[in-house]
Image (cartoon, helix red, strand yellow):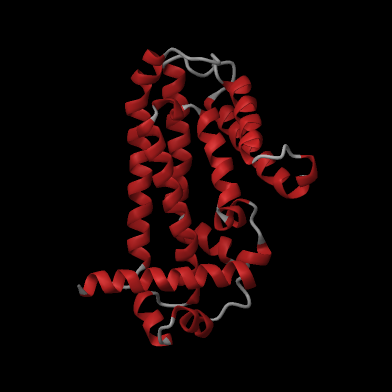
Amino acid sequence: MEAAERTERGERILDAACDLLLAWGYRRVTTDEIARRANVGKGTVYLHWKNKDALLLAVVLRAKCADHQRQLARMRADNRNILPSRLLRWALLDFMDDPVLRAVYLDDSDVLGRLNEIAKKELAELMAAGTQSLRAQLSVLREHRLVREDLSVDQQMYACMAIAAGFFQAEVLFPERAPGRPEERADVLCHTIRTTLETHADPDPRLIAAAAPGIIAHYQRLEELSRQEVRRQLRQ
């Protein structure tokens, strides 16, 4: 019961910290206000995290961990989601739905302050694993003739990241020019990635099934690493 109560209390503190981070931004948030919002004592916050930076980093990490879990669940539920076009379609929808992910992907200094710099140091291994997962995904897809080979893997990775970043930025820079529904905007991204990188609009399901286990294994490792990082950030 004590472990369950500790977990529930930690989630309540994280929820309060997340609300304040999004509403006030990194610079204005204080541990005192987080404790008040979570209805706990300030000392209780420090039972879970060593300082404000560690707590707010945990807010970002929780959002990323949930994102990795969604990615993996979608691949398992429908193997077609191993394709970059479909993976990034979902990424844009998640970006539009989760304000923490939105702040992270846009490097929003008003919200995050120096938190992104802290994250780059603290979460270097996790970020490297994410890059490696994308590289492995494209490599396996190339082996199964599901993406083109007229660009190198590194060039394809750059194309994926650049196109996705452009769509993410467009949500902020050109909102009046975007199609009305989020799903329609995500479909445009899906089409753009598919026509840029993939070999077929309707790929052979047998090729998808053959490629899926190797790709899913890499993303499972990424999801496991993100869960380990969540635990590492907590005081034991």
x and y percent of residue 195 in the render?
Answer: 62, 20
Q: Work out which quarter of the rendered image holds the C terminus and state it.
A: bottom left
Q: Quadrant of residue 180?
A: top right
Where 141 sits versus 126, above or below? above
Residue positioned most to the front: 181
Residue 216 visible? The answer is yes
Q: Count the numbered circles shown.
A: 0
At a point 55% along the width and 23% down the height, the residue shown is 152
Q: Position of residue 44 (x, y in %)?
A: 37, 83
| Left or right: 191 as drawn, with respect to 229 | right
- Residue at 35 percent across and 33 percent down: it is 76
Seen in the picture, residue 11 relative to 106 is either above or below; the reply is below
Q: Position of residue 175 (x, y in %)?
A: 76, 46
Quadrant housing residue 115: bottom right
Q: Nearer the viewer, residue 83 or 236?
A: 83
Query: In front here: 53 or 30?
Result: 30
Depth check: give the residue in front, 10 or 231: 10
Depicted 156 relative to depicted 219: above or below? above
Quadrant including the N terminus: bottom left
Residue drawn 37% across the image and 22% down it: 211
Q: Is residue 163 visible?
A: no
Query: In front here: 113 or 4?
Result: 4
Q: Residue at x 37, y 39 (%)?
A: 73
Residue 173 image position (x, y, % from top left): 77, 48
